[in-house]
Image (cartoon, rainbow, N blue to C red):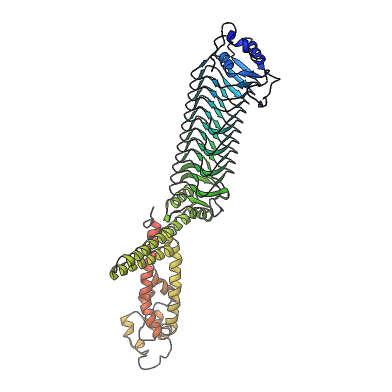
Amino acid sequence: MQRYTSWAEIEPSATPAEKKLRDAVTAAAFCHLGGGGLPDTPDDWTAPNPARHIRADVLRFFLRGGCADCPATELGVMLDGALVTGTLSLTDCNLSGNMLLHNCRFQNGINATRCRTTKNFRLASCRVPFLEAGGLKVDGQLSCIGAEFQNKGGTALNLQNAEIGQTLFLRSAKILGAAHLNGLKTGDQLDCDGAEFQNKGGTALNLQNAKIGQALFLDSAKTLGAAHLNGLRTGGQLSCIGAEFQNKDGMALNLQNAEIDQDLFLRSAKILGAADLNGLRTGGQLSCIGAEFQNEGGMALNLQNAEIGHDFFFPSQDKVQGVINLTTASCGDLVDQPAGGPDGCTLILNGFSYRSIHRFTDARTRLDWLARGDHWKGEFFPQPYKQLAKVLHDMGHEADAREVLYVMEKKLGQERRKSLRQEIANLRSETPSLGQRIARYFLLTAEYASDWLQRVTVGYGRKPFRSIGVLAGLIITFWLFTLAAWHSGGFAPNSSIVLTSPQWAAYDTRDKTPNPANPADHWSNKTIPGRDWESFNAFAYAADVVVPIIDFGQTEAWAPSTTRGPAGVVLWWMRWVFTILGWIVTALGAAALTGIIRRE
């Protein structure tokens, strides 16, 4: 590198382009070479077009302020259309003016490590093999709009720990090689709209632990290779609308532990590979409307422990291949389309919490959604059901909330029985103890019975009025038995005085066929004591037997007889069964109504 200290050292070998640059720099004017525009790549860099040829060392001389004979003004260097040969070395340099380069093509790269400029640093639409600028400090803007940095297999753009006082523009830039911006700090926004970062098989964009003063824009940007934005901090939004992150079978987008003060937009984005947003924090919404997440057989979208300050616009599941992990994530309002989803989309909803849901508040649709996310690796998670029921309850959808909890209890019962069956299977293989297996079978049978009874009678405490229907069914069933016994002569008055009276003794049937066929009916209708006795009603008798809190006086007045035919014998035994069932159902219904058996 030639370190020029005066124009006199340059003038003997100065090209026409360098002389024109000198005149422009000293006059605070823009230097347009060769009519402006980006020059073609020379066939021979040792003999470029003199009208556009600027040596990197000469350019460095003017960037550093020139000399007393040709001093640069406070505007610095403004150059368009140059062919710059050699490597521009600005390491540890202090630039007092602007560096405004447009449409310049560099033979080699730019070294600007720890360079400091109090104004603007611009490489608009330039073609540079690399920019090595770790620790760069720019008080104004750093603009690389439309620029191209090409260093395939190496580092094309290095801005590690750089500090940009205002905005960093990489809009429509193309970086072919690694782009390292980790530790970057900007006072204003970072604009990468339409930029391309290509480093297939490696890191295409590294913004780890970067601190962006305002918004970060990656709209319509494309990355081929990993995009690491973990630990990123933005004072505004992060917008990736229409962006494409591609790193198949690897990490496509890494936003672990990123903190976005406002909204995160992934609207219409395409992520081909894993999208890891574990520990993400946003002050605003997260919008995945129209986004596509493709990582078949792996983690497509990981939002574990994420905290979304406002709305979460959930991705349409027909555009997802892979797992969506929402374990312990939280958001404000959930806006989604729960129905549908391909077989390749798997949900993990354990610990996911939200304040409310928009649309699709019916239990049937939501239960289908929960069923796709309540298991992971064979383990059942009841929390998603609890969460949905709570939200539906708070939104006023009481019936839907109860249905959700009912299904949860049903699935918990299935899981308990599954566990018992597994224990039995393990006992068979591990121990020959018949007693232990019998005990486990007994417990399994008891579990089945208990689960069935709670489910049918009170819906696990979530549907207490089912007990009324069950009681009605028991009453009707027993009513049929009662009718059969009554019409076949299987009833007698429930009174020792009546049974020993001469009127009733006339109906003795021990040694002969009864005449009349129904003594109880004949006695109650034809005799004076019978007409004054409690009239028999089969339905009221059935209700008296089944429902313990009802007393129509039928069981006090009438009883089935065990000596007047088989119907009476059957009914005599059946009333004990139906009385016990009635007590059980009534007790369960009362417990459900008072909330005793609800497992909140």
Q: Residue furthest right?
A: 35
Query: Residue 572: x, y in percent?
Result: 36, 79
- Using the image, determine if residue 40 lies above or below residue 266: above
Residue name at image x 37 percent, y 75 percent: 575
Decide if residue 558 is in sight here.
no
Question: Considering depth in this image, is 322 or 92 the residue closer to the camera?
Answer: 92
Residue 9: image quadrant is top right
Q: Viewed as shown, does residue 409 lie left or right of 4? A: left
Q: Viewed as shown, does residue 322 lie left or right of 19? A: left
Residue name at image x 35 percent, y 70 percent: 580
Query: Residue 486: x, y in percent?
Result: 43, 81
Decide if residue 519 is in sight here.
yes
Question: Considering depth in this image, is 511 or 321 the residue closer to the camera?
Answer: 321
Q: Viewed as shown, does residue 13 lie left or right of 411? A: right
- Using the image, determine if residue 299 lies above or below residue 594: above
Residue 64: image quadrant is top right
Query: Residue 592: x, y in percent?
Result: 40, 59
Question: Considering depth in this image, is 179 or 119 the residue closer to the camera?
Answer: 179
Q: How many numbered discs, if any?
A: 0
Q: Residue furthest bottom?
A: 512
Query: Residue 453: x, y in percent?
Result: 40, 65
Q: Residue furthest top?
A: 69
Question: Considering depth in this image, is 49 or 271 the residue closer to the camera?
Answer: 49
Residue 410: image quadrant is bottom left
